[in-house]
Image: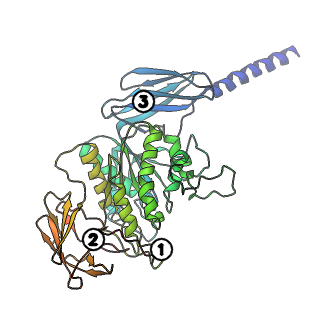
Amino acid sequence: MKKNLNFLAALLLLLTFTSGSLLAEIKLPAIFCDNMVLQQQTEAAIFGMATKNASVNVSTSWNHKSYSTKAAADGSWKVKVATPKAGGPYEVTISDGKSVKLKNVLIGEVWICSGQSNMEMPMKGFRNQPIAGSGEAIAFSSNPNIRLFTVKKAANLEPQVNFEGSWSLCEPANVVDFSATAYFFGLMLNKALHVPIGLINTSWGGTRIEPWISESGCKNFAWVKIPDKKPVEKLSQQTPTVLFNAMVNPMVGYGVRGAIWYQGESNRNEPNEYAKLMPGLIENWRSVWGIGDFSFYYVQIAPFDYGQTGLNSAYLREAQLKASTVLKNTGMACIMDIGEKDCIHPAHKETGSKRLAMLALEKTYGIKGINSQSPVLKEFKVSEGTVKLTFDNAPNGLTSFGKELSCFEVAGAAKRFYPAKAFITGTGITLISPAVAEPVAVRYAFHDFVVGDLFSTDGLPVSSFRTDDWEPVKN
């Protein structure tokens, strides 16, 4: 009997010890794992959960330093570690009595890649919708200095502390299912900067912009309805805040250089609101991250034939163009030349991605000799029935690459637009139209689907624009 009691006592002690050890084990958000990339030359945050009030120690192999903190009453903890110039691989060890070691860690440049389906679209394409050049790109994609992270789709009414996903190596088996826009962007940065690149893809096709903004951010817009916190049987991914809560909040604070964004199609019928929501999202993310006004670049939606319902999508493109001038450290990549009439997902993703990368290389990394911004209208003058336009961001002038300019229209006081003959003259454009003796307004490529034909000599297309402020008419 005594022997049995001693055995039970020993078993109870063992169970108690094991239970305590399990409770003490460090728990990290998915963003912290083997193969991750930490932002170089910064105070990079590392955070997670542990036993309440436990001492947590973080050791970094690149400088052989240790950083200590104490977990809060709810078990949460956070430290900031000094990161060196780009390099690796390194290891990070985290312990509160039991160690967790993160291996094959690189130090480099980290970018968030977010939006709807044109960001989500993988290198293999969607069904019956290809990515141009993807076969060769995938075949040559093995690169030890690029790492990929895809956040699993999820929606939640409450801010979450974790999501599903993991850092993976850049090799064909992983690249084939990764965002094409993000991959081509990261590849160009890697080639130009010669440093490791970490790409975090958090996107969901067909979603509006409001779900990607936090509750505090949504409160800045009176027309956005903050959802009730009551549980629902099926939560729509279009509900404001729910994608931020589930797919962004768990990595808030992770060290990043910036973000790229490709979204807008699902908001095309509310261009006036979108012109405010786009900078609102940027300010919201910057605010919650707390690392300053990090770079934020986005793709203007491509021309597409939306049919006979809703607004002409040129108004949304106009809203995106306006938004690009509101905040510092932002920029817009224009893709007026690669839209497809019958496919909302342009195949030439590499073109748009490279334009995003050019923005980053010039504006974020300060590389001289690059002109990354499309020409934009500077001045509009009318004299004796002739219109003259001048442009900013065209230091070497304009070009149509030998084609006749066919996207300009002019209107008189009656507000009816007619095609105009357009000529490149010096650093500007001259327009005439026999149908309009006294022009009062000009529009360029201001249709749902149109192929832009005006560029800078750097090959950057001019966005849809108009000189009037007349109210749009729904199709």
Residue position marked by numbered label 1 in the rendering: 310
Q: Residues within 10 Å of mark 3 (few under 14, many from 20)?
A: some
Query: Residue 385, position in %: x, y?
Result: 18, 78
Label 2 – label 1 distance at C-alpha: 22 Å
Q: Residue furthest bottom?
A: 435
Badge 1 density bin: few <14, some 14–19, many ≥20, Cα 10 Å: few
Residue type at mark 3 is: Glu
Return the residue found at the far top: 2
Residue 452 is marked as 2
317 to the left or right of 16: left
Residue nearest the viewer, comparing 78 with 178: 78
Q: Reading the chain from its start, which is encountered first: label 2 or label 3?
A: 3
The C terminus - image quarter: bottom left
Q: 439 left or right of 66?
A: left
Q: Amino acid at mark 1?
A: Gly
| Mark 2 secondary-structure assignment | loop
Q: Position of residue 154 (x, y in %)?
A: 57, 52
- Which of the two residues, 153 or 93, is positioned nearer the viewer here? 153
Q: CA distance from mark 1 to mark 3?
A: 53 Å
Observer-side mark, 2 or 3, equals 2
Q: How many marks?
A: 3
Quick one: SS at disc 1? loop
Q: Is residue 301 visible?
A: no
In the displayed structure, 126 sits above or below 341; it is above
Q: Quadrant of the N terminus?
A: top right
For residue 91, which numbered disc appears in the image?
3
Residue placed furthest toward the right: 1
Out of 413 and 29, give the one closest to the viewer: 413
